[in-house]
Amino acid sequence: MDGYALLSQGLEIVLALLLAPLLGGWVTQCRAWLLNRRGPGLLQPYRTLHKLFVKESVVAEQASRIFRAAPYVVFGCMLLASAIVPTLSAELPLSRAADAIALVGLFALARVFISLAAMDIGTAFGTLGARREMLVGFLAEPALLMVLFSASLISGSTSLSATVGTLARSEFAIHPAMAFAGIAFTMVSLAENARVPVDNPTTHLELTMIHEALILEYSGRHLALIEWAASLKLFAYSCIGLALFFPWGVALGGSPVELLWALPALLVKLAIGGAALALLETLSAKMRVFRVPEFLATAFLLAVIGMLVHILLRG
């Protein structure tokens, strides 16, 4: 393992920690502009995290160790997932040890812990949110796997670094399979990150909320870790989409100059992606909870169709 790989991995982790809250602030700012409103500043997520970290955490008397450990586990899973995805460079030590299946497993592990923690206290809202969260995960994770498998068929490997390297080095071409996979990935990303039309991250209405119902009992540093983990999840999904469908700009060689040029390319792509997400949320309406299975089943079918199209065209 050379120094360049360690440098790339370290930069990936630091950028994920720093840029994840900024990405959430940028999406919120763009939504406010589109709605002709004056939204909070770009640095508001950092102020919120600082405010929560300095506050005392209030924990219920009947809370078990799962409730106390869940924020740290969820934060660790999201940070590790962000470190696996090749955002700046394809030469990542962690990418060699974990492939696309392990990446989906990290998302699933975080979901299990946050759901168990929500049910641990015994409140009605926590149990309701945990059931809805597991329903979304039960349908979204297979769809995400199919999307990643559709991309891996092109490179012949489930390693994200290998897939990104193959797509970035190949000549520009329109892959029908990737078109289906891109639509499916967008639908899964909206569901997994509690965005409109599946969920509304700004609501506390008990009839519609999913993610917010899971974290109502948290406060202080525990809530700060969960909010930071949610930002890291959005950052990780954004980087997965950019790596699979817009891999240009990722450093493929072992040159620090390529790594230096990859940073502004990543910032530009994240800015465009955040604005597109805000536009999509503004044009969409919140769907009923009972329509979410149909929404995610459609994403799964589109991802499967993408795999079949690739196999048929290659054959």
Image (cartoon, grey):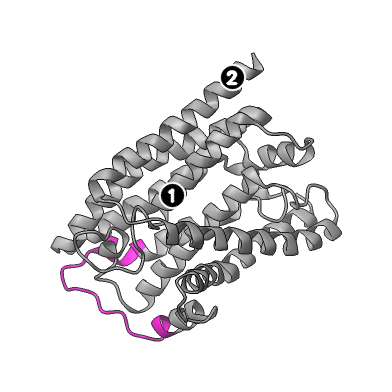
**Which element is circle 1 on?**
helix
Q: Which residue is mark 2?
A: 311
| Element carrying mark 2 | helix
Asked whether the viewer can see residue 129, the reply is yes
Give the image location of residue 30, x and y in percent: 52, 70
Q: Which residue does the image show at 79% across and 39% down from the upper left? A: 169
Residue depicted at 35% across the width and 52% down the height: 111
Q: Nearer the viewer, residue 100 or 290?
A: 290
Q: Amino acid at mark 1?
A: Phe
Q: Is residue 13 left or right of residue 63?
A: right
Location of residue 291 in the rendering, given as x and y in whole percent from the top left corner: 27, 44
Tell me the residue that label 1 is attached to: 107
Judged left or right of residue 284, residue 177 is right
- Above-or-below relation of 17 to 160: below
The residue drawn where x is 45% and y is 78% is 37
In the picture, residue 269 is in which quadrant? Answer: bottom right
* Residue 154, above or below 258: above
Q: Position of residue 173 (x, y in %)?
A: 73, 34
Measured Cα–Cα span from mark 1 to mark 2 = 28 Å
Q: Which contiguous range is marked in magenta?
A: 51-70
- Considering only order in the chain, which callout, 2 or 1, is on the residue closer to the N terminus? 1
Q: Which mark is residue 230?
A: none
* Between 245 and 111, the one nearer to me in the picture: 245
Task: Name the residue nearer the viewer: 130 or 304.
Answer: 304
Q: Are marks 1 and 2 in contact (CB under 8 Å)?
A: no
Dot 2 crowding, Cα within 10 Å, few <14, some 14–19, many 20+: some
Instruction: Work out which quarter of the rendered image holds the C terminus and state it.
Output: top right
Mark toward the viewer: 1 or 2: 2
Residue 60: image quadrant is bottom left
